[in-house]
């Protein structure tokens, strides 16, 4: 009869967690290091192929553990080289993972939750509501599966947690995944090549200070609290001043020398006026910052439109002449709905999405 106990998925366990796991089996800590290299550096999940483990250990691992990454439900390739995968999760839900190739790097954008609780009014993920947190295996498993699908010729050099969900509301599961991204025996990425993007969860930013070093991106989108609360309702709880104080605390630690990247989605007639750029300069004057302007990506049912090219460049000019590093994010993969804020995971019909947006706006109006 099969063992009724579920097998432990070793994927997603950090080095320290794996060492503890093997210690309980009476095995030496270096077993953890061997497993990490097999799984993340060589892409091997079959214990039989792990030839530097004893036969007895391989058999026990086979019997009691497994190494399972999310499966690919579908793969979509954009004409610009961007690849989007819909990854299947147990329980029938799905998340999206996007690979964005550039001449000098390959960035993987991964999800941390199925859906999102935050209701940012310009984001399509919000329209699907919140389903659940991803486990660490499902977070790092997106990297594992993407690396497998891309093959050895296209390397993942950067990882951004900018897909579906709010990573700092799932830090318990995000943290071991970040450790594996940084660990030399796993993906070995430098701190500046792993970015956590948050809508501004202040306690999460503080909690991240004792994790592995990573770059922080903050979704700001507005220079004042009134407007930011309309775009990012979480601002009511953690207004701009508190958010920026948390950013400074984050930078004050012994991180690699860095600044915070502030993401600013450019929405026509809402947050794209030159005086708003000037206000942004004032607000960010005391935080080492870069600003990444993101052209708004429309989705069915949204009342918002993308700022004109002119408005985006004018905004950038104001920021630059104030001494700020300001870049404009190139929109990639929009022919496959892989662009920022277009990730919906479970496919909702356009009419359902429209209805959800209407509901959201009505709730906002009442709030
Ligand atoms: N919850 C995290 C990470 C996911 S969003 C966060 O808020 O940072 C990743 C980035 O895409 C955020 O800056 C988000 O504000 C932006 N974004 C969301 N919807 C967008 C849209 N429709 N067009 C352009 N950018 C969008």
Image: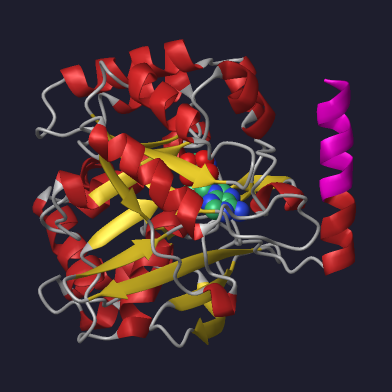
Look at the picture and state if 88 lies above or below 249. Answer: below
Q: How is the image coloured?
A: secondary structure
* Residue ID at (21%, 52%): 193
* Residue ID at (12%, 48%): 29
* Residue ID at (13%, 63%): 34
Residue 108 image point, x, y percent: 35, 64
Principal SS element in the magenta part? helix
Look at the picture and state if 19 lies above or below 96. Answer: above
Visible residue check, residue 163: yes
> Which residues are drawn in magenta?
357-367
Q: Quadrant of the C terminus?
A: top right
From the viewer's side, name the closer residue of 273 and 33: 273
Query: In which image quadrant can residue 157 be found?
Result: bottom left
Residue 102 image point, x, y percent: 26, 73
Look at the picture and state if 20 lies above or below 350. Answer: above
Look at the picture and state if 345 lies above or below 45. Answer: above
* Residue ID at (71%, 50%): 304
Query: In which image quadrant can residue 284 be found?
Result: top left
| Residue 123 relative to residue 366: left or right | left
| Residue 279 relative to residue 54: left or right | right
Q: Quadrant of the N terminus?
A: bottom right
Residue 331 image point, x, y percent: 45, 66
Visible residue check, residue 68: no
The answer to whether residue 258 is magenta is: no
Marks counted in the figure total: 0
The answer to whether residue 363 is magenta is: yes
From the viewer's side, name the closer residue of 144 and 192: 192
Residue 240 image point, x, y percent: 48, 17
């Amino acid at each position: 009869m099969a063992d009724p106990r579920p097998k432990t998925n070793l994927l997603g366990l950090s080095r320290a967690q794996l060492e503890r796991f093997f210690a309980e089996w009476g095995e030496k800590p270096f077993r953890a290091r061997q497993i990490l290299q097999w799984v993340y550096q060589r892409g091997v999940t079959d214990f039989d192929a792990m030839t530097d483990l004893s036969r007895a250990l391989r058999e026990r691992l086979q019997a009691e553990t497994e190494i399972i990454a999310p499966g690919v439900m579908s793969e979509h390739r954009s004409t610009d080289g961007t690849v989007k995968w819909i990854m299947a999760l147990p329980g029938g839900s799905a998340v999206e993972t996007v690979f964005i190739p550039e001449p000098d790097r390959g960035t993987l954008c991964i999800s941390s939750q199925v859906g999102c609780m935050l209701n940012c009014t310009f984001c399509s993920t919000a329209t699907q509501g919140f389903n659940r947190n991803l486990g660490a295996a499902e977070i790092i498993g997106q990297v594992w599966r993407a690396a497998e699908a891309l093959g050895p010729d296209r390397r993942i050099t950067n990882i951004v947690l900018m897909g579906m969900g709010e990573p700092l509301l799932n830090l318990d599961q995000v943290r071991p995944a970040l450790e594996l991204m940084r660990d030399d025996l796993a993906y070995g990425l430098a701190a500046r090549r792993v970015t956590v993007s948050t809508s501004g969860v202040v306690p999460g930013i503080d909690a991240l200070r004792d994790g592995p070093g990573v770059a922080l991106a903050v979704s700001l989108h507005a220079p004042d609290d009134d407007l930011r609360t309309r775009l990012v309702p979480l601002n009511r709880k953690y207004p701009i001043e508190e958010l920026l104080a948390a950013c400074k605390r984050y930078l004050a630690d012994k991180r690699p020398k860095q600044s915070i990247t502030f993401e600013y989605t450019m929405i026509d007639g809402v947050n794209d006026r030159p005086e708003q750029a000037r206000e942004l300069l004032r607000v960010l004057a005391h935080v080492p910052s870069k600003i990444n302007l993101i052209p708004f990506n429309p989705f069915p049912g949204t009342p918002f439109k993308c700022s004109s090219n002119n408005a985006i460049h004018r905004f950038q000019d104001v920021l630059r002449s104030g001494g700020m590093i300001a870049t404009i994010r190139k929109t990639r993969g929009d022919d496959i709905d892989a662009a920022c804020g277009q990730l919906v995971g479970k496919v909702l019909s356009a009419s359902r999405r429209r209805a959800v947006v209407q509901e959201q706006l009505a709730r906002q109006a009442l709030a």
